[in-house]
């Protein structure tokens, strides 16, 4: 029995020698095809008139209509169904399985929409082409089919082929269909195979595209303007993160990849663009785990003449809108939980949250000495450079985050960890900031933006001091940004969303790598075996 008639081989789990044998067999078939004047790689196009999912849906609808019209008259019904065979369709896709029944073969064809069965018979496509099809084509090959849609005796909607064409030859076997491609490392490194073998993976990325499109529609409908800002910057600010650095040869200047979108978007608010947003990649020189990837998709938006309460209202409404539009519900499953985006999101200050989950009331802790003492008592590690507000945040991370499963806004952060945020007028040690947590993960971060250039310079000065004390994630002073603030920025609300984490939530994906088509992976040395986990991976 030739390879194409057998179960496809689990290529990733076979010895290299076996793969080489299978590849040689397929290379020999390709050589024979070329020798016979049929080179599949010379084909430049194939006119596709239908997709698998739509063909099946259309046939079901027409069939139901015919049955209803015929009112139980079986002879009339059969004649009407037979008349549908006059409607020629053309479809293209990859052969996923093959059942040889002599002069008639069944294959499963998968295109971007779904799979559909194709019935191929020697009498219809010609004896010579049929022999070539059986001897020189394989599972994994990409083919074109022209024929008509019908329902088999076993009840499966299929395409009856009248002509077939080899469009591209697969020279490596696909993983075996019953076991599929399960190893996560191989799946992430060979996403092209993962998408072919695992339909649910394709569904995740289709949904990702719909989520981003829904966000764009929502913001466009609310008067926001989408913009683009630089990725290569001289000063990577706007977030607490270590940047990647590179060198710009033409200018003989060291530059960095952006870690945030914030400072350029605020410049546009200064310039009079009152509602702006950007969806783009940012880059942070950090570890890899189930929540973090060094490059990820961030969306930031800024709106003049509002504050962080306005950003909370917008965020809650947008999350609800996107879930309803993409998932058809505001109650979405995530792991063992059912997340309810339909009810009002809980709102707690950071002090209230820490008191609720640790029993420690930082409203009564007014000095650094008191903060250090309670941290020692509770086993919370801190560094000498940490101030009272830093220790409050360490308590939040240690005692609170894991409990924030349902949507919860955490508000009013300490000023020490919020260098770009307006102070609360009635509590100047705190700022008008919130983070949204769902499933114990930060989903977004928002401020009433600091627009006082004098205060902003002092905040930058404090960041420079932290940098000198070893904080590699501290911001450097950005003189051009300060100049923009001196021109004048209106009161503004701003927010940053982790798009990948929102996609994880709405697709019930446990790891950020499951929602990135090509996640960052450690390079493999030539001829190496399969690696273990990435450095820092959970």
Image: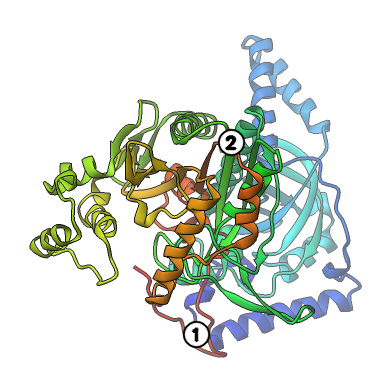
Work out which residue is located at the far left of the displayed protein and give it: 377
Where does the N terminus fall, quadrant-wise? Answer: bottom right
Q: In the visual, does 4 lie left or right of 343?
A: right
Label 1: state its secondary structure: loop
Determine which of the numbered discs, if any, sits on residue 68 in the image.
none
Determine the residue located farthest toward the front in the rendered image: 454
Q: Residues within 10 Å of mark 2 (few under 14, many from 20)?
A: many
Using the image as rendered, state which of residue 115 and residue 415 is in the foreground.
415
Residue neighbourhood size for the residue with mark 1, other residues' Cα within 10 Å, grouped as few (<14), some (14–19), many (≥20):
few
Residue at x 79%, y 79% (from the top left corner) = 250
Q: Position of residue 106 (x, y in %)?
A: 65, 52
Any mark on residue 15, and which?
Answer: 1
Q: Are marks 2 and 1 in contact (CB under 8 Å)?
A: no
State whether residue 194 is above or below residue 471.
above
Q: Is residue 373 visible?
A: yes
For the point 16% across and 41% down, which residue is it?
356
Label 2 sits on residue: 303
- SS category of the residue bearing label 2: strand
- Left/right placement of residue 188 relative to residue 401 reads right
Q: State the image coordinates of residue 229 (x, y, percent, origin top left).
A: 69, 54
Q: Nearer the viewer, mark 2 or mark 1?
A: 2
């Amino acid at each position: 029995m030739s390879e194409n008639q057998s179960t496809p081989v689990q290529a990733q789990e076979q010895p290299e020698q076996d793969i080489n044998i299978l590849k040689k067999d397929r290379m020999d078939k390709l050589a024979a095809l070329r020798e016979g004047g049929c080179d599949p790689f010379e084909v430049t196009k194939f006119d596709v008139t239908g997709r698998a999912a739509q063909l099946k849906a259309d046939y079901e609808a027409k069939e139901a209509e015919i049955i209803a019209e015929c009112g139980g008259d079986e002879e009339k019904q059969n004649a009407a169904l037979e008349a549908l065979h006059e409607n020629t369709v053309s479809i293209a896709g990859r052969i996923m399985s093959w059942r040889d029944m002599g002069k008639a073969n069944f294959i499963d064809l998968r295109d971007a929409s779904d799979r559909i069965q194709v019935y191929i018979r020697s009498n219809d496509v010609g004896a010579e082409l049929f022999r070539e099809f059986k001897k020189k084509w394989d599972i994994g090959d990409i083919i074109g089919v022209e024929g008509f849609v019908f329902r088999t005796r076993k009840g499966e909607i299929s395409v009856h082929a009248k002509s077939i064409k080899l469009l591209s030859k697969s020279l490596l076997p696909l993983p075996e269909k019953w076991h599929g491609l399960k190893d996560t490392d191989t799946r992430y490194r060979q996403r092209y195979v993962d998408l072919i073998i695992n339909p649910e993976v394709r569904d995740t990325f289709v949904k990702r595209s719909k989520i981003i499109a829904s966000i764009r529609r929502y913001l466009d409908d609310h008067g926001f303007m989408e913009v683009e800002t630089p990725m290569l910057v001289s000063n990577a600010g706007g977030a607490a993160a270590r940047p990647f650095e590179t060198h710009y040869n033409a200018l003989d200047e060291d530059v960095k990849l952006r870690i945030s979108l914030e400072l350029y978007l605020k410049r546009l608010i200064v310039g009079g663009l009152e509602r702006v947003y950007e969806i783009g990649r940012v880059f942070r020189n950090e570890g890899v785990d189930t929540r973090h990837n060094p490059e990820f998709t961030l969306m930031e938006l800024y709106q003049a003449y509002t504050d962080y309460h306005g950003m909370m209202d917008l965020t809650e409404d947008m999350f609800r809108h996107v879930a309803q539009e993409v998932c058809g519900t505001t109650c979405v499953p995530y792991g063992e939980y059912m997340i309810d985006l339909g009810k009002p999101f809980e709102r707690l200050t950071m002090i209230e949250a820490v008191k609720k989950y640790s029993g420690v009331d930082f409203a009564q802790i007014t000095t650094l000495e008191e903060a250090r003492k309670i941290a020692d008592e509770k086993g919370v590690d801190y560094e000498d450079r940490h101030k009272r507000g830093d220790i409050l945040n360490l308590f939040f991370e240690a005692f609170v985050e894991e409990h924030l499963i349902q949507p919860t806004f955490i508000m009013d952060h300490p000023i020490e960890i919020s260098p770009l945020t307006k102070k609360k007028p009635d509590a100047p040690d705190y700022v008008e900031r919130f983070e949204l947590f769902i499933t114990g993960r930060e989903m977004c971060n928002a401020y009433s933006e600091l627009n006082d250039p004098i205060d902003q310079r002092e905040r930058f000065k404090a960041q420079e001091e932290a940098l000198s004390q070893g904080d590699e994630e501290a911001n450097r002073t950005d003189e051009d940004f300060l100049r923009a603030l001196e021109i004048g920025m209106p009161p503004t609300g701003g927010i940053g969303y982790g798009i990948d984490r929102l996609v994880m939530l709405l697709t019930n994906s446990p790891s950020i790598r499951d929602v990135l088509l090509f996640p960052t992976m450690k390079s493999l040395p030539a001829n190496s075996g399969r690696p273990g986990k990435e450095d820092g991976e959970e």
